[in-house]
Image (cartoon, rainbow, N blue to C red):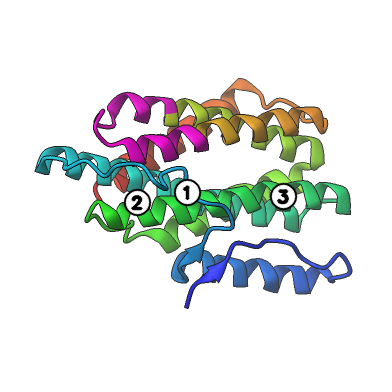
Amino acid sequence: MQRTASNTQPRNLSLGDRWLSALDGGLRTVFTPTRASRPSPAEGLPRAELGPGDAREAGALMRVNHVGEICAQALYQSQALFSRTDELRGHFEHAAQEELDHLAWTADRVAELGAHTSHLAPLWWAGAFAWGSLAGLAGDKWSLGFVVETERQVEAHLASHLDRLPEADAPSRAIVDRMKREEAEHADAALAAGAQLLPPPVQGLMRLAAKVMTTVAHRI
């Protein structure tokens, strides 16, 4: 059974209920196929025949991007859980809604390329949930700063994928380009909401963690 992309929670939930909702969201993210609420950017584009090497590389890159969207769900779920205000919780939920579309688009494209999604999906979700929880516990301004840094790094990562994806793979390129633009919008929105930029050592630690994830997910 597929689920339609939705992350909105009732505002009167207790903390315990929000914990259960977040864990339920995690199980759905990892184990339940998601149906996007918006058409894929790849819709209607020609599916060019890719050689075995190009198809394998495109599939691996889109698998990495799919893992990134699993992590995005975990981050936003955990940050919403520890938000001090309903307004900020709504901010995270809105961003997560767009990220759910990204999750569905990348999963569909991975399948079309004959590749598989990461076998370590539960591990990626759990690790990202822990990161997001730490950011949320640090306070709302730091949590928003974590969003800014995450999305800036993801934007750069997606730009590198546009350089690496086969020119003939128009569907994958269209998906990555749309994702890149929307990640930039999420960073800008977090800045406008009052983000406190993270210190350089924390930014470096985040880049290291992302490097480990992308390297492993490219293969497994």
Q: CA distance from mark 2 to mark 1?
A: 10 Å
Q: Which mark is residue 109?
A: 2
Q: Is residue 85 visible?
A: no
Mark 1 highlights which residue?
40
Q: Nearer the viewer, residue 104 or 127?
A: 104
Expressed as whole percent of the image width and height from the top left, the position of residue 80 reads: 74, 54
Asked whether the residues under the numbered discs 2 and 1 touch, taking CB atoms below 8 Å apart as contact, a structural biologist would say: yes
Asked whether the residues under the numbered discs 3 and 1 touch, taking CB atoms below 8 Å apart as contact, a structural biologist would say: no
Q: Is residue 7 left or right of residue 175?
A: right
Expressed as whole percent of the image width and height from the top left, the position of residue 199 reads: 66, 23
Classify mark 2: residues with Cα within 10 Å, few (<14), some (14-19) or many (20+): many
Kind of residue indicated by mark 1: Ser
- Secondary structure at badge 1 equals loop
Count of picture labels: 3
Farthest-out residue, left? 52
Q: Nearer the viewer, residue 174 or 90?
A: 174
Q: Which residues are magenta?
A: 159-179
In the image, residue 47 above or below residue 19: above
In the image, residue 37 above or below residue 87: below
Q: Is residue 142 magenta?
A: no
Q: Is residue 60 left or right of residue 64?
A: left
Mark 3 highlights which residue?
94
